[in-house]
Amino acid sequence: MNSKKYGALKSLFEQYEEGSIHQSQKEIIDDWFDQHQDGEIVDMLKDPEQEARIYKELQQRIIQPVKPVGIIRKLSQATWLRAACIILLAGIAAGLYYKKHNTTTDKPALVFQTFQTGNGQVRKVELEDGSIIWLNAATSLRVPKPFKQRSIYLDKGEAFFEVKHDANNPFTVTTGSIVTRDIGTSFNIRAYHPQTEYRVEVASGEVAVERLNNSGKPEILNKSISKGQGLVYNVTNQKSQLIAKSPELIQGWKTNGTLYLDMLTLRQIAEELSRHFKIRAIVKYPELDARQYTINLGTMDLNTSLLELTLRTGMSYELTPNKLTINPSANSMK
């Protein structure tokens, strides 16, 4: 019984003792008492054995009838005995609740250190076990303190992991319902929209990827993704595909600032330009071009990148100091 339910029950019992309880509520309590006298157990406390013990203890403890104090109205001895039982029941129930509550060893709440980056920022994080994490722009990551279980939480964004392998203490990265497990490796995770898409790409070694179902149980998506491979998982339809990608491209953004657009729509490209160049970019009528593009912009500046995108996608654009507006090609749907 939780504390809120106990408080309500105690208040009800006090009203019964004072005689101010509503008749319908009084009948419920009377029925409970009568049924116990008849040997029937009513599961008021959601624990029949505990309720039976409480009732037995009440019978043993109440020997003398309880006399009313400060109440003019006369009640029968049986009524006062019943009221006394109810008040004692409340006290015993509270004692059992708080005893259980205080003796239960709760797991200490995890304490996290949060690392974040803004648009145009790349950050290096060194962990206690010797592992290194690189955060790309607009990324949020949490690391538990102390770092004993080696479980990282990538809430949003992109990060490259250089893991210090420990066979006895695996390294895991959780993003939403997806868990990536290190099998001695360096790998990249991209999840700017973790509720819709998740990507993991391996630069060296091997990883395994699991999905937690609605019951919290892990289901294997891929038990072995090795160097030069990546997994693209669509969270919405729960479908995944394995792709090939060179280790150089996988980590290019953190080694030399390469901007590699890998299977992205114009809307996603606009988001990428916003993060990379720290500019507000939008697409007018993105539904006009839902195609995915793979374009390596390398270390081009913004103006050169836009010219390349224009040639490759047929888009046009308007650039002001504060905003980039991308217009899909009028022929893109043909």
Image: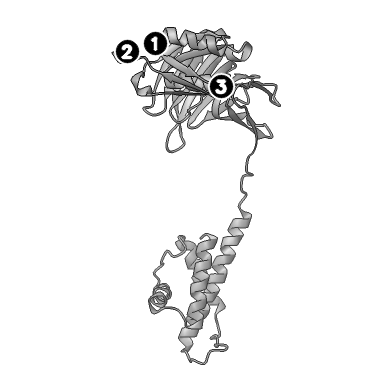
Give the numbered dot on residue 182.
Answer: none
Q: Quadrant of the C terminus?
A: top left
**Disc 1 designates what residue?**
314
Q: Is residue 223 visible?
A: no
For badge 1, the amino acid type reads Gly
Callout 3: 10 Å neighbours few (<14), some, many (20+)?
few
Quadrant position of residue 240 = top left
Under circle 2, the secondary element is: loop
Q: Amino acid at mark 2?
A: Asn
Q: Determine whether, in the image, residue 26 is placed left or right of residue 91.
A: left
Q: Which residue does the numbered mark 2 point to in the structure image?
A: 331
Labelled pair 2, 1 in contact (Cβ < 8 Å): yes
Image position, residue 316 (x, y; %): 42, 14
Residue 189's x, y, as percent? Answer: 53, 21
The residue type indicated by label 3 comes to: Pro
Q: Which residue is mark 3?
A: 321
Asked which secondary structure carries label 1, the reply is loop
Residue at image coords 62%, 43%: 109
- Compute the Cα span from label 1 to label 3: 23 Å
| Label whose residue precedes the other's in the sequence (2 or 3) | 3
Q: Is residue 298 visible?
A: yes
Mark whose residue sits in front, 2 or 3: 3
